[in-house]
Image: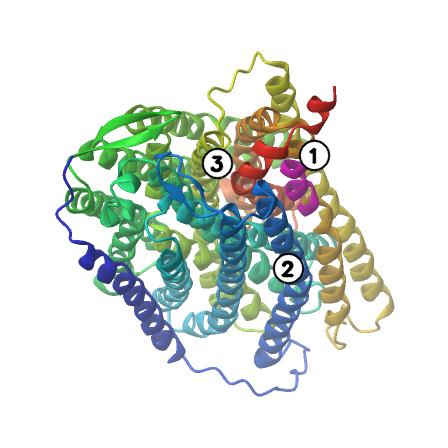
Amino acid sequence: MGAGILPDLWTLILIPLCAVVGIAFSLIQWVVVSRVKVSVEKQSPPANNKNGFSESLIEEEEGATSFLFTEYQYVGIFMVAFAVLIFLFLGSVEGFSTKGQACTYDSTRMCKPALATAAFSTIAFVLGGVTSVVSGFLGMKIATYANARTTLEARKGVGKAFIVAFRSGAVMGFLLAANGLLVLYITINLFKLYYGDDWEGLFESITGYGLGGSSMALFGRVAGGIYTKAADVGADLVGKVERNIPEDDPRNPAVIADNVGDNVGDIAGMGSDLFGSYAESSCAALVVASISSFGINHDYTAMLYPLLVSSMGILVCLLTTLFATDFFEIKSVKDIEPTLKKQLIISTILMTVGIAIVSWVALPSSFTIYNFGAQKEVKNWQLFLCVCVGLWAGLIIGFVTEYYTSNAYSPVQDVADSCRTGAATNVIFGLALGYKSVIIPIFAIAIGIFVSFSFAAMYGVAVAALGMLSTIATGLAIDAYGPISDNAGGIAEMAGMSHRIRERTDALDAAGNTTAAIGKGFAIGSAALVSLALFGAFVSRAEILAVDVLTPKVFIGLLVGAMLPYWFSAMTMKSVGKAALKMVEEVRRQFNTIPGLMEGTAKPDYATCVKISTDASIREMIAPGALVMLTPLIVGIFFGVETLSGVLAGSLVSGVQIAISASNTGGAWDNAKKYIEAGASEHARTLGPKGSDAHKAAVIGDTVGDPLKDTSGPSLNILIKLMAVESLVFAPFFATHGGLLFKIF
């Protein structure tokens, strides 16, 4: 069937070279941002008790760092325990034998023993977990570094502030994309030293990398989401509604915890989440390809096609970033959102050309892909279309998300208008908007799955997911831009800077709020494709010839799987509610018992509020995390692989829809509030100003939506990915020893 044009040696060089270029570009952006000087010396607060500029920065960064280190201590214990579990379960498949086993694609040849898969899967799991943790931590450090610099640049104009916020987001985007690619590439080549020609065993063990990345992302997303929303809800309900003081007012005791939460939830959590999606989509594609003609013929370049697509993505995103930072200039507020949207369009168009080049040089004109026990012949142009389907489906999801969450369009304006009659109608309109916003993204995902599966079976679905994530550096840049701008506004308020500066940071934040929603849309859409690809790999690895929904074993799994996202959402929502309750009580206590706090002559006790959020988030992340991690193990061991396949399918179908609805509902309520606060149109001015009844109703809607868009919604996409990749990793064990209850009865 021939081979691609690109020699293996060039593949060996190009992938790490692109990763290094991405890291170098991120460091250049960092250096440019660092030229905006900020004093780090503590200053005594001014007479009106507006927190000193540097003092608020120090408290914010210390709070974020302290929380992440506390979280990582608990997560580290889990990582060690689960790594031992992986080794024991996978090692027991062949009774910890060191003898080789017959290869799947060629029974006449002997492949490496199951014990080797157990050991290397464990190593890959730890590597994936560490890379995910580092990605989240670096993102948080970059955000806290950039917040104040964005505020300072806002004094010179909205364009200068935008550049700093966007460059800082790009630092995170490129570091994460390049580090993920480089670590995966190095891991594959180091493992290959042992596995040699046993590509099936090599890439089966690599799936541990995706499991490690998503495990850490789950805890980061859940804990970060609980942290940020407990503080946000407490600050809004008491500060805005009860005390009628501005958002981020330094008199509010929860304001530092709120700003810390933006960093640990929206930055560190999102970074870990999208890294997990990238790792899993790559692993799913590699597992399926390893038992196809690429693996059988030991075609190194074609086998690493997913990594070459990601490498091209880094170069494309680098060029795209220059359009925002160097080629065009932001001159006014109205230019911000179009510039961010152009990033998505430009990167998608350029990436389409890039994918065509990679497909032409790396793939043979014809090859076979493993398809449920048979080999399906595929042309290279068909695989190109599979990647493009994912890429363009992601763009469609992004624009639909923007339409339903941006206050520039009628859906959010209708939600804002409903605030005239109180919080109840606001909540009704917001829920209706969220449900309706699911329709087009689901059709986009469904069409993407149909086309990609028709062309290249589950491998097509896996590379479609990779296509959606190929512009991850740009996606993360515009996503991280939002929280950075939000915190820049908070710092301006706390430091007592002029109203003009706060207006500029609010304009940046309003655009960032929409891009954050777009980022969540990308994450959810890619999670659906990744989960399906992992599901296909699991079914193949567990040697299930067909998943028959009419079989009782499968159908009960479908029902339970569809229920899990509701159970998980209930846990996370209640966790935010419990933590917010304590936060509200503490903020009220301080306002009632600290003399001069409301007048601005006394300083609030920020540390207590930070501690409430930290303790609550660490404590409350355990139960939802256990639900997700233990479900595949319990179902696989006691009910077997057929029931587990039903659980995975049910959770995928249910989870994607709830996640899209929750994220868009929360985003719409948030921007409806901002629409009233900004008063930029005649309609908005009839609903305002701040403190009006309509505004208070909007704040309540925003408060209800906070845990939906920043805790439950984003965490659900990790749930469906994580259960699928965990099932894939443990598939040999479940196939050999699973289904204990059915064996007994």
Residue 682 picture location, percent across and down: 46, 42
Residue 517 lies left or right of residue 240; in this view the side is: left
Q: Please tell me whether the stretch drawn in magenta is mainly helix, strand or loop.
A: helix
Residue 130 lies left or right of residue 382; in this view the side is: right
Residue 420 picture location, percent across and down: 62, 35
State which region is magenta.
625-634
Residue 153: image quadrant is bottom left
Q: Name the residue under label 1.
A: 567
Q: Mark 3 points at which residue?
A: 531
Q: What residue type is labelled 2?
A: Val
Tell me the crowding category of disc 2: few under 14, some 14 to 19, or many 20 or more residues within 10 angstroms, Cα based. few
Q: Which amino acid does label 1 sit on?
A: Trp
Using the rendered image of the protein, determine whether residue 241 is visible from the camera's viewpoint.
Answer: no
Q: Does the CB distance between marks 1 and 2 fall below 8 Å?
A: no
Q: Mark 2 points at which residue?
A: 80
Task: Out of 51 and 170, give the one closest to the viewer.
Answer: 170
- Calculate the distance from the C-alpha at mark 1 to the C-alpha at mark 2: 27 Å
Looking at the image, tell me whether mark 3 or mark 2 is earlier in sequence order.
2
Quadrant in which the N terminus appears: top left
Mark closer to the observer (3, 1): 3
Q: In the structure shown, which secondary structural element does the residue marked by tag 1 occupy?
A: helix
Mark closer to the observer (3, 2): 2
Residue 457 lies left or right of residue 729; in this view the side is: left
